[in-house]
Amino acid sequence: MQRNFRLLTEVLQVSMERGQAPGEIVPVLSDAARLAREQKLRDLLVISSDDDPATPGAVCAAMEELYGLGAPPPFRIAFVTCTLPQYNAYRFAERYAHRFGIVAKVHVSVYEAENWLGMRGGLRAATPPR
């Protein structure tokens, strides 16, 4: 699976494409969590392409892997999906992630995911001065 990591303000964006097997999601999310932790980030924006072969079992295994790495709760993951099978897989993992203190949400657009994470145009929304 090809992947691209992009550091945004307080968020690590993960883009995935050309997947061959469902289990490929596990090392991608594991590597993303490690990088986020190194950069002291607590949020992931995971953008799935139409050829992401994720299954509920594979994405749940990835959640277990993140927990095993010590992903610090509250760790948030916004999943953006392109197809119904992906949506179903990540939706299942959304509920499963709560077992490990990970807050996950599935979205159908990057805009929606950025709003959920509190981002605007790829940057964290600024807090108005007091």
Image (spheres, rainbow, N blue to C red):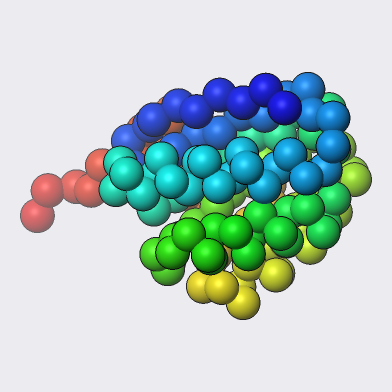
The answer to which of 75 and 61 lies nearer the viewer is 61
Residue 72 placement, left or right of 128: right
The residue at 62%/77% (across/down) is 99
- Which residue is more in the foreground, 68 or 100? 68
Query: In this rendering, would 107 be left or right of 68?
Result: right
Q: In which quarter of the image is residue 36?
A: top left
Q: In this view, does 92 lie above or below 77?
A: below
- Give the residue furthest to the bottom: 99
Q: Is residue 114 visible?
A: no
Report if residue 6 is visible in the image.
yes
For residue 120, above or below residue 75: above
- Number of callouts in the render? 0
Which x, y percent locates residue 53?
85, 38
Q: In this view, does 103 lie above or below 21?
A: below
Residue 66: x and y in percent read 54, 58
- Quarter of the figure that contains the C terminus: bottom left
Tell me: 94 left or right of 75.
Answer: right
Location of residue 44 in the rendering, given as x and y in whole percent from the top left corner: 50, 45
